[in-house]
Image: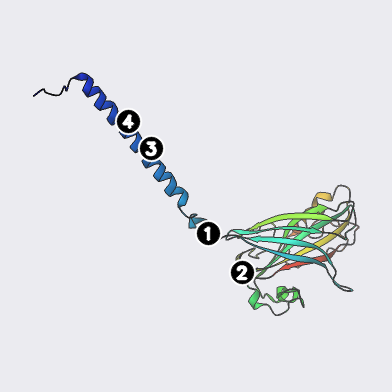
Amino acid sequence: MRQHDHGPATAVAAGSEATRWARRTARSVALVMVAAVLAMPASPAHGAAASHSTAPVFTIPPPQPTMVGSSNLVRTDRGISVTLKTTGLEPGDVATLWWVVANAPEECEAGLPGLSQCGPGDHLAGRGDLSVLNAAGRIVGGNGGVSFGAHLGVGDTSEALITGEPGLLDPRGAEVILIVKTHGPKVPGMTAEMLSTFAGGCHDQTAPPDARPEMIGPAGPNDCAEIQISVHGPGQ
């Protein structure tokens, strides 16, 4: 019987076939691995999904509250972000936006009727674990409208009005009250402070006794007032 030829040519052919098989196998394994990665759920290390809420912006009485805008709040485990658009302001005026964060709203007893669980009385009494912080400042547009955008991270007290307050501790469970304040027309040489402080440009420098001096701002000739409010309740 004739023997099969196992010479060099046959060995080369066998080697080439083995190489092709190995490459096909490697490609198949790679495709399976890619498919497996794509099918995996998102990593839980990033925490729960962000929550979103929308709330109207009202004028602060008197005489009666009027809806003049809206705000959108996004909550994550790391902080809160807001966009607020409003109208009814004086064109060219300086306006600031303030966070009033109640980390324990269940403790509050002096909420604003029909709006919030917490109010100024709770802040003065030390209820609700409240903090007041600067969020943003803007120049009002020619149509009397203004848009704000701001973010507040957990534990960030760099813009806190009052010494020793904790800032944001519970992004998901806090009641978030947004206050729009007018500082009147721009004062030459003082606009930057008006945009970032509690009473910059204001002739009335009334502020909490334990307010941080750098957050009060320089006095000026203007009448200033908190004129609008938007509230996002706990868990929204």
Disc 4 element: helix
Q: CA distance from mark 2 to mark 4?
A: 60 Å
Who's the residue at 90% across and 59% down the image?
Answer: 222
Residue 162, position as x, y percentages in the image: 71, 64
Q: Tell me which corner region of the image, top left, top right, bottom left or bottom right, holds residue 202.
A: bottom right
Disc 2 element: loop
Residue at mark 4: 20
Q: Amino acid at mark 3?
A: Arg
How dense is the environment of label 3, judged by Cα within 10 Å: few (below 14), some, or many (20 and up)? few
Q: Amino acid at mark 1?
A: Gly
Disc 3 element: helix
Residue at mark 1: 47
Asked if residue 160 is positioned above or below residue 186 in the image, the reply reads below
Q: CA distance from mark 4 to mark 1?
A: 45 Å
How dense is the environment of label 1, judged by Cα within 10 Å: few (below 14), some, or many (20 and up)? few
Q: Nearer the viewer, mark 2 or mark 4?
A: 4
